[in-house]
Structures are given as C-alpha cells and as structure tokens.
Amino acid sequence: MSLAVSILRDLLAGRAGVDAIALLSMSAALALGETLAAVTVAVMYAGGGVIEDLAVGRTERDLRASIDRAPRSAHRRVADAIEDIAIENVAVGDILLVRAGEGVPVDGRIIGPSALLDESAVTGEPLPVARRSGEAASSGTVNAGETFEMQAAAAPGDSTYAGIVGLVTTAQIAKSPFIRMADRYALLLLPVTLLAAGVACSCRTRSH
C-alpha cells in the first residue's frame, strides 16, 4: 500500500513515466488475482528506488566533500607584510602566499623558482607535479612542497575549482539524459502496454 502511495505521489508531482506503468501493472495483476506478478513488479520498483537513493546519497557526500575542500581564505602580500583575507576579497593581480599543505585559493601564475602541486582533486593525477615560475596554478590543487607565491589570474567565482563544484551541483539536481529518455519512452509505450493487457485479458476470457 505504501508503495502505491509513493508512486501516486510521484505522478501527482509530475514525475510520470516508469511509475505509471508500474502502478498499472500492479493494479492489473491484483485485479486478476496474480499476486505473485504484483509482488514481482513491486520488488523491482522498490529495488530501483533503493539503488537510486544510494546513488543520490553518494553524490551528496561527494558534493559536500568537494565544498569542504574549497578554499575559504588566502594570504595576500601587501608591501612587506602578509594579511589574511576571505577568499571573496581576492582580486585579479593580487600576490598570494601559499604555504605547505594549503590549497591554491584561485587560478593564477607561480612567482618564484618553482612549486610542487598535488593536482589529484582537479586532474586525478596521483603524483605531485612540479611547476616552474610563470606556469599556471589551478585552484583546488594543494601545495605539496615549500611555500611559494603566486599572482591571482582569476576571481574566486571564475576559478577552476568553483567551476567543478558548480558542475557537480548541477549534475546532482538534474535528471540524467538516460532517465529522461526512459520516462519519455515509458509514457509513449503506455498505450501499447494497455492494449496488450486488454488483448491478454480478452484471450483469457475466451479460453474460459
């Protein structure tokens, strides 16, 4: 009963598609006394829901981890002094200090001899990469070597890691193309399903 209520709730919310066929299949099976068929459809539908919930939960955990790794502050050089500022206050052209073990706050260019960066969160490369003076340092990477300085080349919202978090967030709230296609074709095939069920019932009635 609770499964039927869940399906009806999805239909009323406009999430029609496979749900409609599942509901009709179970209703028809129960009406014809085919309890095993109704239970089979219910188990398949519920199992799909459990798998979807697990996938959504994992995506949410990954998203939270990505957001937690996002830099929230930066060390800006002003003359001979270093001041700590919120990431939102970093401007293009600022000279930033990145200490050992810290994340690169925004996209920029390395100033100084070299830098050793852990880029695994951005590129998937498991080993630290050596970057020379003048080469790019992407936000989201981590300083795996000694302290170095860089010049900001992009605002925080326009940097690499902000784009990655944005893409992950969008992917989480949007249906995948495969799911949208499945729902669309399910609705198109619904009349065919009803026709086939009607023919089967008719044949069964004649046989008796």
Image: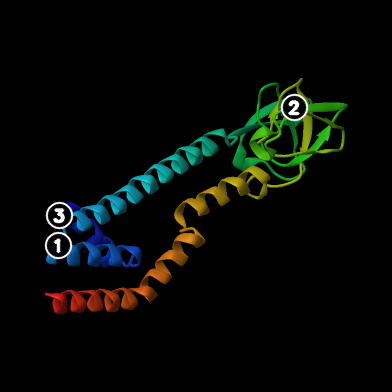
What amino acid type is highlighted by mark number 3?
A: Met
Badge 3: residue crowd in 10 Å (few <14, some 14–19, many ≥20) = few
Residue receiving disc 3: 1
Badge 1: residue crowd in 10 Å (few <14, some 14–19, many ≥20) = some
- What residue do we see at 15% from left, 56% from top? 35
Q: Of marks 3 and 2, which one's residue comes earlier in the chain? A: 3
Residue receiving disc 2: 128
Point out the image quarter for the N terminus. bottom left
- What residue do we see at 66% from left, 22% from top? 101
What amino acid type is highlighted by mark number 1?
A: Leu
Image location of residue 18, percent across then percent down: 34, 64
Q: Secondary structure at mark 1?
A: helix
- What residue do we see at 58% from left, 37% from top? 70
Q: Nearer the viewer, residue 1 or 204?
A: 204
Q: Secondary structure at mark 3?
A: loop
Q: Of marks 1 and 2, which one's residue comes earlier in the chain? A: 1
Taking the image as shown, residue 5 lies to the left or right of residue 109, namely left
Q: Based on the displayed image, in which of its 4 quarters is residue 97 positioned?
A: top right
**Cα–Cα span, label 3 and label 2:** 55 Å
Residue receiving disc 1: 30
Q: Secondary structure at mark 2?
A: loop
Tag 3 and tag 1, C-beta contact below 8 Å: no
Taking the image as shown, residue 82 lies to the left or right of residue 110, namely left
In this rendering, the label closer to the viewer, 3 or 1: 1
Q: Of marks 3 and 1, which one's residue comes earlier in the chain? A: 3
Q: Based on the displayed image, in which of its 4 quarters is residue 109 positioned?
A: top right
Indicate whether 41 appears above or below 208. above
Camera sees residue 108: yes
